């Protein structure tokens, strides 16, 4: 009888403990909601930050590889130049000559300079909008413009630095921009660094592309480099942002980059992987802020769970003391608190995971409206897994902190005398 009754007593005590756990949480609805919100906030921040990191990594990799270059040569970071025509300070000088020098290297089969400037564009000289003007050397084939969507001539306006060659006045528009302007191949648009220059420079649309909008995350209009320099007033110093380099098929990219860096010590020559890493490392302050925000959310979520459980335990101290007095083990009470912590954590995880796609869609919409880059926040399964793991860890930590309070409780201190 004793052996048979022991499991029943254990089961009865466990059922009683679960009942107490449920009553405790039900009696503190406000604090329970606060704890669930805290966990959900931490989970939401984890999933969004992880999704943003996933999207930035994927987008950055796709953007660089989409232009299909093996190496990149830069003279410094792109800088904004408020108050100047074009609004961007391109740091690489003598772009045409430098790209020609790099192209003469035996391990290089092609090199094209790229420049970026803010320009006004309109189909009718009256309703102008601003887009990113992209200037390229050559005929555009080296930077991914396909057949039928590239220029039929090279950069003849440059004319060995005199800028007195004929302007082709040809432009390749971003597909979405062409649709927005309601123009197609053969139509005209007006473009320039100022409204006056834009009205005086009519360009013929020779094609559309998605290459540079993916690379820059914004609507683009691609023209010959010298023509972009002329319509934005930057022709004198032949400035560009970078040079894209295509190596010979059997070339060692790392060795070629080192050789070109030695030949051009004022330039930084990097492989695709190194260039992306450089861009990523330049966002150190942003990444540090994101890590700080996530850490703060985890700490706050843990604190909310621990304090909620602690207050619930304190409110029910007489019931718990009674359970201890009739023989309920401290280990069982600790399990009770752990069950409550797990319940709060699961509630927060469910809410946080449910809100993640909604918040991601909202962020993606804002980012696309501001810079034209769609779907920056990516949500693969491992992002959700990270959020679930963090939420459960918060519940475990909170329950552990509250459990120490239970273990330190003296049952005789909570009975009326």
Image (tube, helix red, strand yellow):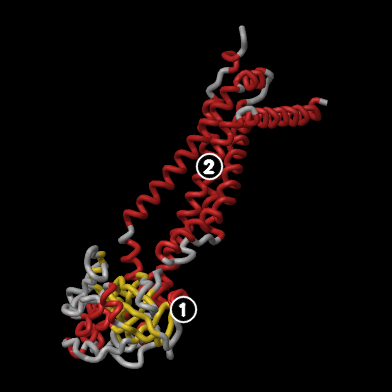
Residue name at image x 40 percent, y 68 percent? 60
Q: CA distance from mark 2 to mark 1?
A: 48 Å
In this orientation, which residue lies closer to the viewer: 247 or 162?
A: 162
* Residue behind mark 2: 39
Task: Where is residue 47? Give x, y as percent.
Answer: 50, 53
* Residue behind mark 1: 182
Residue name at image x 26 percent, y 87 percent? 103
Is residue 260 at least partly visible in the picture?
A: yes
**Can you name the residue that lies furthest to the front here?**
126
Residue name at image x 35 percent, y 68 percent? 276
Q: Is residue 108 above or below residue 412?
A: below
Q: Is residue 83 left or right of residue 169?
A: left
**Can you name the residue that lies furthest to the right here?**
1
Residue 95 figure quarter? bottom left
Q: Quadrant of the N terminus?
A: top right
Residue name at image x 40 percent, y 72 percent? 219
- Name the secondary structure under disc 2: helix
Q: Is residue 248 left or right of residue 97?
A: right
- Name the secondary structure under disc 1: loop
Q: Residues within 10 Å of mark 1 (few under 14, many from 20)?
A: few
Q: Which mark is residue 80?
A: none
């Amino acid at each position: 009888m004793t052996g048979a009754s022991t499991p029943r007593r254990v089961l009865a005590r466990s059922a009683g403990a679960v009942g107490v756990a449920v009553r405790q949480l039900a009696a503190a609805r406000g604090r329970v909601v606060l704890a669930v919100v805290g966990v959900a906030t931490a989970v939401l921040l984890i999933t969004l930050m992880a999704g943003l990191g996933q999207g930035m990594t994927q987008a950055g990799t796709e953007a660089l590889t989409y232009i299909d270059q093996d190496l990149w040569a830069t003279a410094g970071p792109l800088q904004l130049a408020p108050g100047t025509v074009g609004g961007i300070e391109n740091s690489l000088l003598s772009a045409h000559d430098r790209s020609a020098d790099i192209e003469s290297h035996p391990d290089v089969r092609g090199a094209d300079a790229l420049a970026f400037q803010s320009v006004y564009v309109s189909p009718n000289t009256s309703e102008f909008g601003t887009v990113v003007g992209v200037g390229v050397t050559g005929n555009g084939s080296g930077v991914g413009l396909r057949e039928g969507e590239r220029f039929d001539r090279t950069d003849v306006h440059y004319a060995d630095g005199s800028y007195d060659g004929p302007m082709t006045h040809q432009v390749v528009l971003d597909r979405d921009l062409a649709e927005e302007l309601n123009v197609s191949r053969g139509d005209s648009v007006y473009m320039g660094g100022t409204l006056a220059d834009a009205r005086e420079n009519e360009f013929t649309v020779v094609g559309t592309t998605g290459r540079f909008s993916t690379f820059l995350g914004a609507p683009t209009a691609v023209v010959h480099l010298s023509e972009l320099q002329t319509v934005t007033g930057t022709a004198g110093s032949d400035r560009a942002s970078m040079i894209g380099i295509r190596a010979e098929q059997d070339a060692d990219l790392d060795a070629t980059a080192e050789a070109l860096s030695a030949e051009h010590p004022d330039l930084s020559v990097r492989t695709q992987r190194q260039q992306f890493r450089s861009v990523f490392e330049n966002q150190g302050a942003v990444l540090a802020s994101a890590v700080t925000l996530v850490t703060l959310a985890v700490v706050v979520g843990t604190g909310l769970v621990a304090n909620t459980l602690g207050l619930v335990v304190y409110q029910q101290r007489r019931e718990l003391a009674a359970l201890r007095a009739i023989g309920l083990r401290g280990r069982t009470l600790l399990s009770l608190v752990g069950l409550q912590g797990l319940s709060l954590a699961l509630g927060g995880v469910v809410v946080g995971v449910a809100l993640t796609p909604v918040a991601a869609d909202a962020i993606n919409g804002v980012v696309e409206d501001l810079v034209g880059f769609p779907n920056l926040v990516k949500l693969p399964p491992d992002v959700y897994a990270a959020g679930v793991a963090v939420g459960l860890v918060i519940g475990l930590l909170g329950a552990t902190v509250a459990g120490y309070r239970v273990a330190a409780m003296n049952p005789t201190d909570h009975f009326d005398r």
